Amino acid sequence: MTLDKVTDIYDLQKIARRRVPRMFYDYADSGAWTESTYRDNTDAFEKIKLRQRVARNIDNRSVSTTMIGHDVSIPTALAPVGMTGMQHPDGEIHAARAAEKFGVPFTLSTMSICSIEEVAKATSKPFWFQLYVMRDRGFAADLIGRAKAAGCSALVLTLDLQILAQRHKDVKNGLSAPPKPTIANLINLAFKPAWCLGMLQTQNRSFGNIVGHVKGVEDMSSLGDWTNSQFDPTLDWESVEWIKKHWDGKLILKGVNDVEDAKIAAKLGADAIIVSNHGGRQLDGAAATIDMLPPIVDAVGDQIEIHLDSGIRSGQDIFKAIALGAKSTFIGRAFVYGLGAAGEAGVTKALQLLKKELDLTMALAGETDINEVGYQNLLTPPATARKVFVPKAKPEAKAPAKPRAKPAAAKPAAAKSKTAAAAKTTAKRTTARRKPASKKTES
Ligand code: GLV
């Protein structure tokens, strides 16, 4: 299949499966243990039903918005993905270039193949950097300094991987970067000539942010062994404060999937949280993120910007996340499959697909501005929406006896013919979004 015949992310996945060495394709397409959370993440999206609205003027639509004050052409960012440069030679550079041309943030993982400096050299706009905290806090401080020097405009701190969960396929495949020359690997690589040729043409074949930067670390090819010996299991909220102070810039906390944690994160004064279960790759048995979104929005939606990842495979999934109260989303596998299929062009294709699906869904749901999408677009708004947003004795909840004249300065959201509950929901979410959006726009 060629790129012009691709109709959805799953087509890109099929091509990637053919082109990417098995151990790296499997690395991306894996969940922890039974993979129940990995499956739930996508299944939960499918269960959400939308309201089909008709006979509304749906001309002149816009799917652009902001993430922590940065303009984005669609409400998504490329999530940090370890070993992206093994999905395609120089993969991080290809993905970052596609993202900057498309107008969405690219987040470089600490466990990337191309280093912070390599990606900075190959791009022209600031990207975001994801931090894993090592036992050696000096190294964490060093990484923060390198991200600052490279002009990174946000730090994404991952909180749900102090220790690596087990993904069975990685163990069975002997995952390493670069792959070890075992007979099984050599046979598999023989069927991936384009990947091998590209790899021969680049020097970026190991963990670029680590090798050569940590004393005594020359061979860290096994991700599992290395993370489990070097990642800091003592990382706690105090450590998060320490990192916040050191970084002193826009901070996003990734891996929050619980109401209590979301409350702590909001109190800490981060710029955003990512409701994430690491794509089902960490705690097998954790709830799907889209199911956890409503109670988290209910608890902290008016205090902090909320993003969501894990399970997004279409623009319609993005729409559902926004309708349920997320300001924006992150995609991991959805862009990695594009990258594995066709490098930069494949990532661009993935983003184009998502944009088209998002726009079409929005139109058929009767909306024209992604910033006004909300609970009113869901067939069944979440229980928390009813509990919190349906006022009991407030005058605006009652249907007026006669149609009232619109107040002259009514907000567009309130002026639309929505239920009182939905209008109030939008008003609350608009307030929550306005705070970060009023800060200086950077990228
Ligand atoms: C983290 O980088 C992972 O492997 O999920």
Image (cartoon, rainbow, N blue to C red):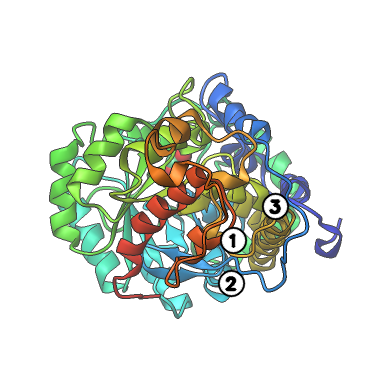
Between circles 3 and 2, the one closer to the viewer is: 3
Q: Nearer the viewer, residue 207 or 200?
A: 207
Q: Is residue 327 above or below residue 267?
A: below
Q: Position of residue 135 (x, y in %)?
A: 20, 40
User: Which residue: 32% across, 63% down?
Assistant: 436
Q: Position of residue 435 (x, y in %)?
A: 30, 62
Which residue is identified by label 1? Answer: 89
Q: Residue type at mark 3: give it.
A: Ala
Q: Is residue 93 above or below residue 277?
A: below
Residue at mark 3 to residue at mark 2: CA–CA distance: 25 Å
User: Which residue: 39% across, 31% down?
Assistant: 164
Quarter occupied by the C terminus: bottom left
- Mark 1 neighbour class, 10 Å CA radius: few under 14, some 14 to 19, many 20 or more: many
Which residue is identified by label 2? Answer: 102
Q: Quadrant of ligand 1?
A: top left
Which residue is identified by label 3? Answer: 365
Q: Residue type at mark 2: give it.
A: Phe
Q: Residue type at mark 1: give it.
A: Pro
Please tell me whether mark 2 sits on a helix, a strand or a loop: helix
Q: Position of residue 11 (x, y in %)?
A: 78, 49
Q: Nearer the viewer, residue 299 or 20?
A: 299
| Mark 3 sits near ligand 1, with its Cβ under 8 Å away | no
User: Which residue: 58% across, 41% down?
Assistant: 28
- Mark 3 neighbour class, 10 Å CA radius: few under 14, some 14 to 19, many 20 or more: many
Please tell me whether mark 3 sits on a helix, a strand or a loop: loop
